[in-house]
Image: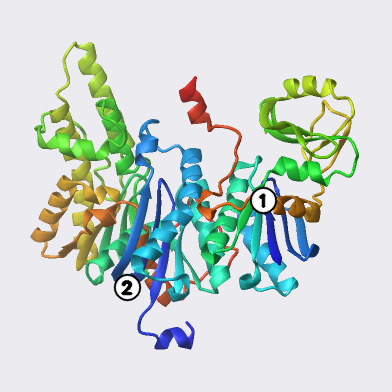
Amino acid sequence: MSDNMKEKKEMYILGIESSCDETSAAIVKNGTEEIATVISSQIDIHKEYGGVVPEIASRHHVKNITIVLEECLKKANMKMEDIDAIAITYGPGLIGSLLIGLEAAKTLAFIYHKPLIPVHHIAGHIYANSLVEELKFPLLAVVVSGGHTELIEMKGHYQFQKLGGTLDDAIGECYDKVARVLGLEYPGGPKIDKLAKLGKNTYDLPVPLNDDSYNFSFSGLKSAVINLVHKEEQKGKKINKEDLAASFQNVAVKSITTKVKKAIIEKKMKTVIIAGGVAANQVLREEIKKVTDELHVKLSIPPIQYCTDNATMIAAAGYYAYLDGRVADLTLNSKSQDKLN
Amino acid sequence: MKILYIDTSSSYLYAAIVEENKIKKQIKKEFGHTLSEKALPEIVKLFEESKVTPEEIEKIIVVNGPGSFTGIRIGITIAKVYAWSRNIPITTISALEAMALSSKQKTYHVPIIDARRGFVFSAIYDKENQPILSPKHIKMDELIQKLEEIKDYIVITNDEIELISKKESYDPDILKIVMRAQEKEIINPHAVNPEYLKLTEAEERKQS
């Protein structure tokens, strides 16, 4: 860190995120205070294809990038010269999508001589919580999204230790696939949550990977739902969608909470945070809350707007990454896969 | 006036800083899959070697395709973010027109970029480099038919086009390209986008 930065009490970071189908820019002060956020979502475009089409996503990112940046600066009433550093999601995500944000960030870092801070997308989801309250360690981060299902232990800022994760599909991916079987429109995950509220846990589904590890598996559960639907159809029986949604959700959430409980006890966690798009799921929130209440640990969940992909969380994480000395040069490349460390 | 030229529409990076109708420094290098990582550092080197600061650039000219989808987006993103943030004029030129302009032969110019599955991106320009056939995603067979009517032509390509013998490889005459682009309209940076000349496969499937 330069002496100049050390003396400076206020650090404004411009975050840029384009890892999937949201083009976003945000300015965050000192990793905790949101100054401005702009998110341009492509969800309505990809809906027509039943999922995110990578090439279409990349085309829209390049169309939107400067508009999003301009709106963000306008909202903050700031100029590029007022920004202290640029934080960018370098991965994981869709490579073509990541590249747009990355090239934009690199270009701005070059023109304005600003430090470029590489941020792992999952670190961003975790640090979405620091926009709400200060993180307290040791901390268990439950990362649940369309691309991730991971339990991460943190003993301090920017110290990530993966305890376990999914061996196949991510939980959000599983929700979307089950939603498709139930005839719900993409993105189906949130719709299952709604539907489940109207149903009862009547269908018998196996709790996946009910073992001693911190890992998860969701492809078996997805197949179990598909098989069940087929069998009932063959028997000429009508599926009760509400009940199936409730039964599925019960099992999916239980597989998470079981391992969360195990991690809190074994690793003596003080705080649990839920991060990622699926953190918006009501039942998952409630069930994890039951566990943390029972074990008297603190639970922190970011508000819904910080759960889905956004650049605010990237700018927040970027601050702590910067304090940890993580600055990249302009050869930084995007990565579709990368370990969080 | 100092102008920055960027073309990342193929596996090559072509870039230059042009001042008062002279090339201060240029890059012509093949990078292939590492273009995304190398493009900007190479451009930075261009600035350093020509002793120009980013603040001194007064105009940007960027090739907007056709070509590699990812490649075009790299150059376009750098160029539009640059022009937007510095509030300087920007304009685009087609990769095919750039190829035609660079040929020294006094014939019709036929730039070809392989688009796979029997298709190419191509256009036909006359001896004065006026378009006879505007840039298109076209079947190779169809293009060959059109060329039979012309006879007096040269193909400019960096791809392996086996069916044609009258061809030369593409070595951009950046100064000539920049001069031509200077005559083109200035575009709002937000509206600077790639010309893919082809829908995505998902869109094509949906249409059919």
Q: How many marks do you count on the picture? A: 2
The subunit carrying tag 2 is A
Q: Position of residue A250 (x, y in %)?
A: 16, 39
Q: Position of residue B30 (x, y in %)?
A: 74, 52
The dot on residue A260 is none
The dot on residue A156 is 2
**Is residue A313 visible in this depiction of the protein?**
no
Q: Nearer the viewer, residue B129 or B50?
A: B129
Q: How is the image coloured?
A: rainbow
Q: Residue at x 28, y 30 (%)?
A: A185
Q: Nearer the viewer, residue A143 or B18?
A: B18
Q: Quadrant of residue A219?
A: top left
Q: Nearer the viewer, residue B102 or A32?
A: B102
Classify 10 Å Cα crowding around label 2: few (below 14), some (14-19), many (20 and above): few
Q: Report whether A94 appears left or right of A111.
A: left
Cα–Cα span, label 2 and label 1: 42 Å
Q: Residue at x 81, y 24 (%)?
A: B147
Identity of the amino acid at label 2?
A: Gly
Foreground mark, 2 or 1, reads 1
Q: Position of residue A202 (x, y in %)?
A: 10, 29
Q: Which residue is mark 1?
A: B8
Q: Residue at x 39, y 59 (%)?
A: A71
Q: Quadrant of residue B168?
A: top right
Q: Report whether A139 appears left or right of A338.
A: left
The vertical placement of B119 against A31, above or below, is above
Give the quarter of the figure containing the C terminus of chain A.
bottom left
Residues tagged 2 and 1 counted as in contact (Cβ below 8 A): no
Identity of the amino acid at label 1?
A: Thr
Callout 2: SS: loop
Q: Position of residue A95 (x, y in %)?
A: 51, 48
